[in-house]
Image (cartoon, rainbow, N blue to C red):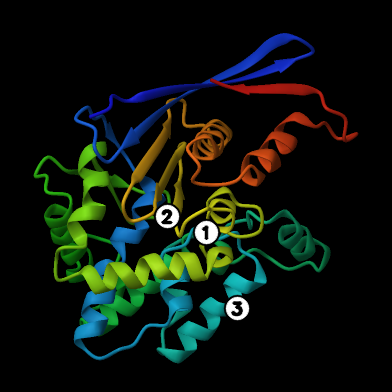
Amino acid sequence: MSKIKKLKVQLNRDGSLESTHFINVYKHDQKEYDYFFPRSAVKPFQLIPLLYEAQNQNILLTSEEIAIFSSSHSGQEIHTELIKTIAKKYDLDLERLVCGKQRPFHEPTADKLLRNNKEYTKLHHNCSGKHLAMLLFSKILNEDNKIYHTFKSKTQSIVKEFFQFIFTDNDIGFGTDGCGLPAIHLRTDSFLKAVNKIKTTEYSNNWSDMFNSYHTNPLLIGGENRTDTNIILNSSKTVLAKSGAEGVLFVTNNDESYLFKCIDGSKRGVDLAATKYLKEIGMVNEKPFQYLSNLYSLNTQNTKAVTITVS
């Protein structure tokens, strides 16, 4: 079994070191582990209880619904319009979403809203799909949706019980995520081993639906030029890729699973390191790293101002 791999991303400006990021790479077959908050990278697992209960009640969720439920989307129209459609389909009140208003990650969308004197809404929040999913879950469970985001609710209690089962670890803690839902804290090895475990459980069909929804709807998972979306679009095999806040990225092809964590919490650091590493092991082509390298090395005059190395 391999040890935790250490990567280093350095940015040099005109030959002088300007910034350094350190990234840990974890694989599913490692003995060594660290504790971490997966943040939004846990969403593929977090939504499995909903899929399971919906299946038991003969509610057929579409691939697009599963994708937006487990997304951290950019707030583009493709995302917000789908959320409106789903809310109408299942008679869900969007005012009940606990996540706050947020500027869309997608800059052209944010700029368009400003030009048209329109405000950002809860639908633009990157976690609005997950919150909509929890509203649906609470409705299926016939419980008060005013507390769907707390452990006082049956909704979150079921999710917590599922986490304790699938991650095979009683040493699990919880904080509060940026969107208001519980944020699990656990071991990296427990997280990665869950991929192979879930395929042998009663949730195997639900996991297959989740995995396939990522492959089928990459633009719903993140959005235009988002790193997890670009990894899925440019993979050599079918993969699930999911980013999380504070420099986390989870990638699996359902056999091999990887977790990347930038120590300083930098999105730039983890995205550059992960796309370069995944290219080197043949899981993705060069396009995701090339896009990021250009993004972070060119100045506003489109002149290369920074040299980036990953080692």
In the picture of the structure, the residue carrying the numbered disc 2 is 179
Q: Amino acid at mark 3?
A: Glu
Instruction: Name the residue located 70 percent from the left edge and 16 percent from the top edge.
Output: 12
Residues at marks 1 and 2, CA–CA distance in whole angstroms: 9 Å
Secondary structure state at the residue bearing disc 1: loop
Q: Quadrant of residue 130?
A: bottom left
- For image coordinates 36% across by 58% down, the residue present is 43
**Marks 1,2: beta carbons within 8 A:** yes
**Residue under numbered circle 1:** 126
Tell which residue pokes out farthest to the left in this image. Answer: 170
Query: Left or right of 137: which side holds 78?
Result: right
Q: Is residue 141 above or below residue 282?
A: below
x%, y% of residue 102?
Answer: 58, 57
Q: CA distance from mark 1 to mark 3?
A: 14 Å
Quick check: marks 1 and 3 in contact, CB under 8 Å?
Answer: no
- Asked whether the viewer can see residue 147, the reply is no
53 lies left or right of 226: left
